[in-house]
Image (tube, rainbow, N blue to C red):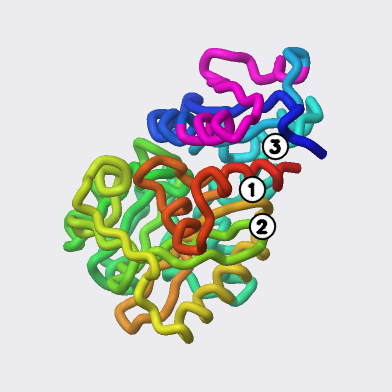
């Protein structure tokens, strides 16, 4: 199968809160494909009805949309319906992993380690008892929307009086909110490409946690790859990440975020099924450590489309 003879749509932009990041990722992916001799074209679902892709002669999709509408199973379902192969996870894994709460519940059922949490919804918010939550989970706490990506709507809560307002803030972004125990140890992210776990990246934000600013704008966030783990810990992490990837049914490529608690034990955080591919992004950084250039990475992801 010679993919260079196919007409490839690079889906980028879209309408989610992560539009700008997707435009940057998409441009990098498009440039890489074109430079390698592929017949690739930028398609922004905000301006083009994706249902017409096949009619307009496209054979395959490189999906680099981030967030809702691109990474949550809906676009995957549409592409299945019109019969176009696409990169990344299928409908079920995309939909599941967009929902942080249900992803964690599935991992927990498989016996995999996740942070302890309380779930608050718009419907039961009135019954929230901050004191009881703090007694169960301690302080500080992390409050985050279940469905929004790119660290939108996060708050670190340091005292019981601020918990309610943090949940109210997160409710602006989603109807389901997670209140989690604070994980004080290292923050790691681990890419998986075609079932192969790539080197972990350790993230050291300038502020107290890795928020949107640190992720996409700040040049003061530090990234270490290799992550500085012992060989034994790197191997244990890789084994955990592969189990987590398989449990939720990922395919092609994904990136799994992991935090360490104060004792240094790993806790699974979430899955990114369409990881960022910008100059700041961590998947390409890890791949480079494994000897895979950006162009090779993009071509490999395309070859894994199904």
Quarter that holds the N terminus: top right
Of the numbered discs 1 and 3, the one sitting upstream in the chain is 3
- Measured in 3D between alpha carbons, the distance from the residue under mark 2 to the one under mark 1, in whole angstroms, is 9 Å
Instruction: Let me know if residue 29 is in the magenta part.
Output: yes
Q: Residue furthest bottom?
A: 232
Measured as percent of width and height from the top left, residue 40 is found at 62, 25
Q: Nearer the viewer, residue 33 or 67?
A: 33
Helix, strand or loop status at disc 3: loop
Instruction: Let me know if residue 105 is in the magenta part.
Output: no
- Check whether the beta carbons of the residues at disc 2 and disc 3 lie within 8 A of each other: no
Q: Who's the residue at 34% across and 42% down the image?
A: 152
- Measured in 3D between alpha carbons, the distance from the residue under mark 2 to the one under mark 3, in whole angstroms, is 14 Å
State which mark lies toward you, 2 or 1. 1
Measured as percent of width and height from the top left, residue 44 is found at 53, 21
Determine which of the numbered discs, if any, sits on residue 86 in the image. 3
Query: Over which residues does the magenta segment extend?
Result: 28-54
Residue 123 visible in this rendered orientation of the protein: no
Instruction: Decide: is 225 above or below 7.
Output: below
Task: Name the quadrant containing residue 111.
Answer: bottom right
Q: Nearer the viewer, residue 47 or 98?
A: 47
The 10 Å Cα crowd at callout 1, few under 14, some 14 to 19, many 20 or more, is: some
Measured as percent of width and height from the top left, residue 72 is found at 59, 40
Q: Nearer the viewer, residue 39 or 16?
A: 39
Determine which of the numbered discs, if any, sits on residue 194 in the image. 2
Instruction: Give the residue pinned by disc 1.
Output: 300
The 10 Å Cα crowd at callout 2, few under 14, some 14 to 19, many 20 or more, is: some
């Amino acid at each position: 199968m010679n993919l260079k003879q196919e007409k490839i749509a690079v889906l980028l932009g879209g309408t989610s809160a992560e539009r700008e990041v997707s435009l940057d990722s998409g441009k990098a992916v498009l440039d890489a494909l074109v430079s390698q001799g592929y017949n690739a074209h930028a398609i922004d679902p905000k301006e083009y009805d994706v249902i017409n892709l096949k009619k307009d002669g496209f054979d395959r999709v490189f999906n680099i949309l981030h967030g809702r509408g691109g990474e949550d199973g809906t676009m995957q379902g549409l592409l299945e319906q019109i019969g176009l192969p696409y990169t990344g996870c299928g409908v079920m894994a995309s939909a599941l992993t967009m929902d942080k709460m249900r992803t964690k519940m599935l991992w927990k059922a498989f016996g995999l380690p996740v942070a302890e949490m309380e779930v608050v919804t718009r419907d039961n918010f009135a019954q929230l008892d901050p004191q009881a939550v703090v007694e169960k989970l301690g302080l500080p706490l992390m409050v985050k929307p279940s469905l929004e990506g790119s660290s939108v709507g996060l708050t670190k809560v340091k005292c019981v009086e601020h918990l309610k307002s943090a949940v109210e803030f997160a409710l602006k972004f989603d109807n389901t909110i997670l209140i989690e125990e604070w994980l004080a140890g290292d923050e790691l992210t681990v890419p998986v490409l075609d079932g192969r776990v790539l080197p972990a990246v350790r993230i050291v934000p300038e502020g107290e946690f890795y928020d949107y600013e640190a992720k996409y704008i700040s040049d003061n966030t530090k990234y270490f790859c290799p992550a500085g783990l012992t060989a034994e810990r790197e191997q244990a992490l890789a084994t955990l990440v592969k189990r987590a990837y398989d449990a939720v049914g990922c395919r092609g490529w994904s990136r799994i975020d992991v935090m360490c608690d104060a004792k240094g034990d790993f806790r699974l955080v979430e899955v990114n099924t369409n990881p960022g591919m910008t100059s700041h992004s961590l998947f390409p950084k890890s791949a480079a450590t494994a000897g895979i250039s950006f162009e090779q990475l993009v071509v490999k992801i395309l070859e894994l489309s199904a």
